[in-house]
Image (spheres, rainbow, N blue to C red):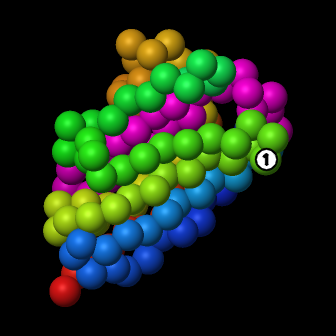
Amino acid sequence: EVQLVEVGGGLVLPGGSLRLSCATSGCTFEDYAMGWFRQAPGKEREGVSCISARDGSTYYADSVKGRFTISRDNAENTVSLQMNHLQLADPAVYYCAAGQVPRVLFPYSDAYHSWGQGTQVTVSS
C-alpha cells in the first residue's frame, strides 16, 4: 500500500514562502508521477503542479507559474513544492498524490490512485 505524508504547511504573510514536502513509502517511487493538488473550502480540487516519474517533465497551473517549483528526489522518495510569493488566492489544503500518470493527465485528480492526508496552507495579513 502506497503511503504519502505531507509536511510543511502553515501560516504565512502575503508575499511569503513555504516549502511543502511529501514522503512516500510502499511503492517503487521512481515509477510514479507525483502531483500536488489543493482544495479550498467550497471549491473543487485543483491540480497545482505535477512531475513525471523519470524524465522530469512538469506541469504548473497558470495561477502558480513562476511562483511555485516542484522537485523530486528519487533517492529519498520525496517530492517537494517550493511556494514563493504566496497570494491571498493560494490558501487551501494541499495534497500530495501519486500515480502512473501520463503527462496529458497530470492536472486530473482522478488519474492518481494514492493520496496524502493534506496539509493546510494559510495566507493572511
Q: At x 27% / y 81%, what residue is drawn? A: 13
Q: Around disc 1, counting alpha carbons within 10 Å, would you say few (fewer than 14), some (14 to 19), or many (20 or more)?
A: few
Q: Kindly identify the residue that appears in the image at 38 percent across and 59 percent down.
A: 83
Q: Residue at x 73, y 27 (%)?
A: 30
Residue 106, picture quadrant: top left
- Mark 1 lies on residue: 76
The amino acid sitting under disc 1 is Glu
Comparing 119 with 110, the one in front is 119
Between 66 and 95, the residue placed more toward the observer is 66
Residue 42: x %, y % from top left:
20, 56
Magenta segment includes 39:
yes
Q: Out of 59 and 122, give the one closest to the viewer.
A: 59
- The percent position of residue 103, horizontal first and vertical second, equals 45, 16
Magenta segment, which residues? 26-51
Q: Is residue 98 visible?
A: yes
Q: Quadrant of residue 91?
A: bottom left
Q: Is residue 29 left or right of residue 100?
A: right
Establish if 93 lies above or below 37.
below
- Residue at position x 36%, y 50% from top? 68
Report the residue that reaches farthest toward the bottom.
125
Q: Quadrant of the C terminus?
A: bottom left
Q: Quadrant of the N terminus?
A: top right
- Specify whether residue 111 is in view: no
Q: How many marks?
A: 1
- Residue 23 location, x and y as percent? 70, 52
